[in-house]
Image (spheres, coloured by chain):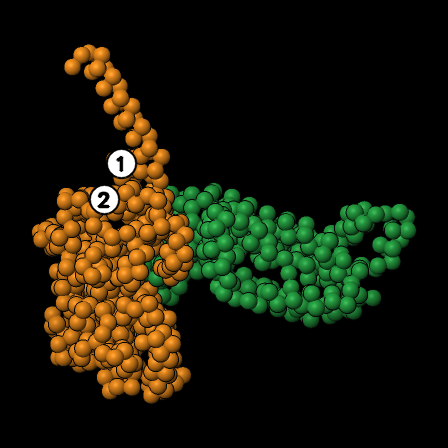
Chain colours: A green, B orange
Amino acid sequence: MARAVSNPRKALNTAIAWGIGLLIFFPILWTILTSFKTEAEAIANPPVFLAFDWTLENYSVVQERSNYMRFLWNSVFIAGGSTLLGVIIAVPAAWSMAFVPSKRTKDILLWMLSTKMLPAVGVLYPIYLLCIQLGVLDNRYALVVILMLINLPIIVWMLYTYFKEIPGEILEAARMDGAGLKEEILYVLTPMAVPGIASTLLLNFILAWNEAFWTLNLTAVDAAPLTAFIASYSSPEGLFFAKLSAASTMAIAPILILGWFSQKQLVRGLTFGAVK
Amino acid sequence: MSSKTLIRTTSALALCLTASAALAQDTTITIATVNNGDMIRMQGYTDQFTEATGIAVEWVTLEENVLRQRVTTDITTNGGQFDIMTIGMYETPIWGANGWLVPLDGLSEDYNVDDILPAMRGGLSHEGTLYAAPFYGESSMVMYRTDLMEAAGLEMPDAPTWEFIREAAAAMTDRENDVNGICLRGKPGWGEGGAFITAMSNSFGARWFDMDWNAQFDTQPWLDTLTFFEGMMSESGPAGYATNGFNENLSLFQQGLCGMWIDATVAASFVTNPEDSEVADSVGFALAPDNGLGVRSNWLWAWALAIPAGTQQADAALQFIEWATSADYIELVAENEGWANVPPGARTSLYENPDYISVPFAQMTLDSILSADPNNSTVEPSPYVGIQFAAIPEFAGIASEVSQEFSAFYAGQQTVEEALANAQAITSEAMEAAGY
């Protein structure tokens, strides 16, 4: 039974939640506002919040200078491809770890996670040389594989956690009814874990979308995604904050919209199994 | 010659021309570059180059530090991702010596390589061979508010001393109205605060290494430099100057919150542009200060175009470099955007042009560039080439760490003695490990 909460307490909780939400969202809001200012207004002191001459000039300049659609398509391809490939590999892996664990399962899980502890720059040269040897520098497919491998430990861990919440007896019942391994995973396990799989997909899509080390170091023209698009507007010698903000807004807009529409699934997935 | 032969010869010639034109149109070169005003402007004129030569150009524009990491990875692995790289005076002689760059000895007579300013040509060469062509060059100088200087009852000499700068800064400071007498770089990073303090230390008689490559941070001139810098900035600098770099100071100056700013000459066109700067009509210029020891505190830098040895299209790349760094390109920009917007500091002929020399900051930029000598940058002899850097591969890593120690001192997190002792230990250890 839900605990009764008094009205003033409820109002206070709501205010605190909104306050924290706004605080987290403020940098994004400021970036979006700055993108509509002139360069002079962008650095004005004291800063101007809303009372400035709104202009679309920065967007126009960015559109003129860069092929936004090419960067966008590369981001969608790389983030989408790596996430899908990762989930396809991770579902059977997480299933075996959750439902038929061996005595080494925990060690394997920990070892997988430990690969995330290695600084990316430590393997830059080996990966770069491999890409040269294989002729896949500045290649979207290569980045799909590399980002998939980077995010695979997280995908496996997330799915493993969700699968652990599903009673093994249900899968046993399915097996007794004659379901094979394929049917068990596809028709029994997956539908029950949809919220978990959806949030895993979304979170990893966001991680791959924002990945800015490999996508900057292994691309030039053909495979450069939106991270390279933003980097092209950053400058330590010259004030281009308004244009940089316009480029950033254009780069985060698709993922922001995706997150907005799928927030219900995302929250459901992230809190899956949190309360028993 | 019979008519048949004539027809055959003409047909063969036409075929050859068509084939070569088709080949030229199929050629695409990829250029890695930085995001600054001059480079972005050049991208806008690329279509004219393509129309004239049939060579298409793809640009990869990156932030300076990202670019440096990106092109370094590519050139050291012979990746061949780029046909032209935008690099600076620090990388060029080192990469040239390693055989990573194509020597630019095939430049045409029309290009007139002797027109490149000698200081730039020297800094972009190794053992007399030019490895990169300067697109624009810069030194550093004093930019100051003429109205505030006048109100303080002082007159800026053309070649001021550090003592005068400190005195003027104190006189121009108005804390009530947030006006800081002086704004300088204190931000960590070898190209940020590290570059400024190294150039400044030269005028105090300091140097990074003695002739045997021993670190010199335990000497009196370094103590004097840091003590003077911190003292002046505490008296007259902005709050939090330890994290201010070029952009932060540019922003402060443009808003009228700095009396003086000593930084790259390229900033002169920003602070005198009425569209962005509130103080555009009251900016004066002077040479970077000295201490009477015969060395000023200005640096020398050039952004230059070089051809990596791994490229398959060296000829097309050379054609582009000839076009982009030529006197004709400068005229093209001047025609369309005015003389104040042409890439400065690369060619002697630009400073002989009466149209350009009438731009307020042109003469002082030239004087600053001419007074900088990368081969004799210190009072005591030093074994390295470079003013705000030492052109050895280890320098960037060492100087980044050392500048962090200095910034920690500016921020009050450690004493000057601790900062210098740490700098000495970092540098000595790294140089020993590198086999010096």
List x then y, in percent, for residue A240. 36, 56
In this view of the protein, which residue sits in the foreground, B155 or A18?
A: B155
Q: Amino acid at mark 1?
A: Thr
Q: Tag on residue B188?
A: none
Q: Amino acid at mark 2?
A: Trp
Q: Tag on residue B53?
A: 1
Q: Residue at x 75, y 61 (%)?
A: A97
Q: Where B426 sits versus A85, above or below? A: below
Residue highlighted by disc 2: B323
Question: What is the distance, in whole Å, between disc 2 and disc 1 at their CAs?
Answer: 10 Å
In this orientation, does residue A47 appear?
yes
Q: Are marks 2 and 1 in contact (CB under 8 Å)?
A: yes
A235 sits left or right of B296 in the view: right
Label 2 Cα crowd, 10 Å radius (few <14 / some 14-19 / many 20+):
some
List x then y, in percent, for residue B117. 15, 57
Q: Where B249 sits versus B419, above or below? A: above
Asked if badge 2 and badge 1 are on a common chain, one would say yes
Q: Residue at x 28, y 81 (%)?
A: B214
Quarter occupied by residue B218 = bottom left
A53 sits left or right of B305 in the view: right
